[in-house]
Image (cartoon, rainbow, N blue to C red):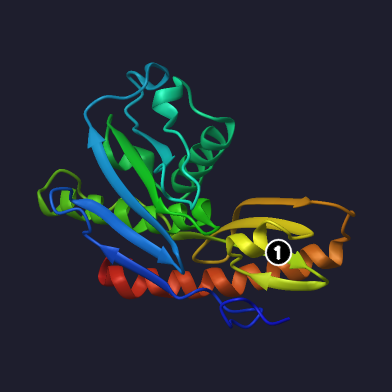
Amino acid sequence: MIRADGRKADELRKPVITPGYLVEIPGSALIEMGKTRVICAASIEDKVPQFLRDSGTGWLTAEYSMLPMATPRRNSREAAEGRQRGRTLEIQRLIGRSLRAVTDLAGFGARTVHIDCDVIQADGGTRTASITGSFVALVELFRDMKNRGEIENVPFVDSIAAISVGLLKGELLLDLDYSEDSIADVDANFVMTGDGSFVEVQAAAEGNPFDKSVLDDMTALAAKGIGELAALQRSILGEWM
């Protein structure tokens, strides 16, 4: 199959992560996956949710939003509607779960880390790009805190990244753009750590069911892509990884 952008089936869109993208924020990054662009920011405040009071541990939570003109057709702001859509809630919970899986929550005390992911241009894979970019923003925040003597060690246990894989017309494709994702027969998102462990797998057949061999092949393809993203994260973060 010839993909619209000329990529091979097992090829990522060119990933670009720019750390320190927001000048006044110590933890931030812009991630670009093809035409998809997400600004990721990490900040911290000196309080925790009620259920963690007096526990001595911290918390990490995420928010996700898409700008009205991130897609060719304008979407209304959710704030104007007075509520968040179900898709938004699902994605931000996924981002939070993913980052908590590789973060030592006791390592920064009774404080809350906020991850904000704002999609400024969407062409598929916004949730996976948000996870990959947010990890860089999070490490940048922790690095700043360590340099200022607020924490003793950078409190993460591994890197984390995410990618999509789809089955389209009988062929497996890595890192779907919107034109592929919108017509895929099977669509899956994989979240994995740098050492190859799984954090989450979301997979669904849009039509006919698929068998385990397809899922196995999708997993192998996802691992290849996430390995490349983890290598990019390491090249950016250097000794902090």
Q: Position of residue 220 (x, y in %)?
A: 69, 72
As drawn, 193 above or below 201: below
Crowd tier of the residue under label 1, counting other residues whose Cα lies within 10 Å: few below 14, some 14–19, many 20 or above: many
Instruction: State the residue in front, 221 or 21.
Output: 21
Could you tell whether 119 is left or right of 141 in the image?
A: right
- The quarter of the rendered structure image containing the N terminus is bottom right
As drawn, 229 above or below 112: below
Q: Give the residue drawn at x 45%, y 43%.
A: 100
Q: Position of residue 99 (x, y in %)?
A: 44, 47
Q: Give the residue drawn at x 11%, y 47%.
A: 149
Could you tell whether 208 is left or right of 180 in the image?
A: right
Q: Is residue 153 visible?
A: no
Residue reaching furthest to the front = 73
- The quarter of the rendered structure image containing the C terminus is bottom left
The three-letter amino acid code for the residue at tag 1 is Gly
Q: Give the residue drawn at x 43%, y 75%.
A: 231
Which image quadrant for residue 233?
A: bottom left
Q: Position of residue 59 (x, y in %)?
A: 37, 33
Residue matched to label 1? 166
Instruction: State the residue in front, 154 or 132.
Output: 132
As drawn, 186 above or below 75: below
Q: Secondary structure at mark 1?
A: strand
Could you tell whether 71 is left or right of 212 in the image?
A: left
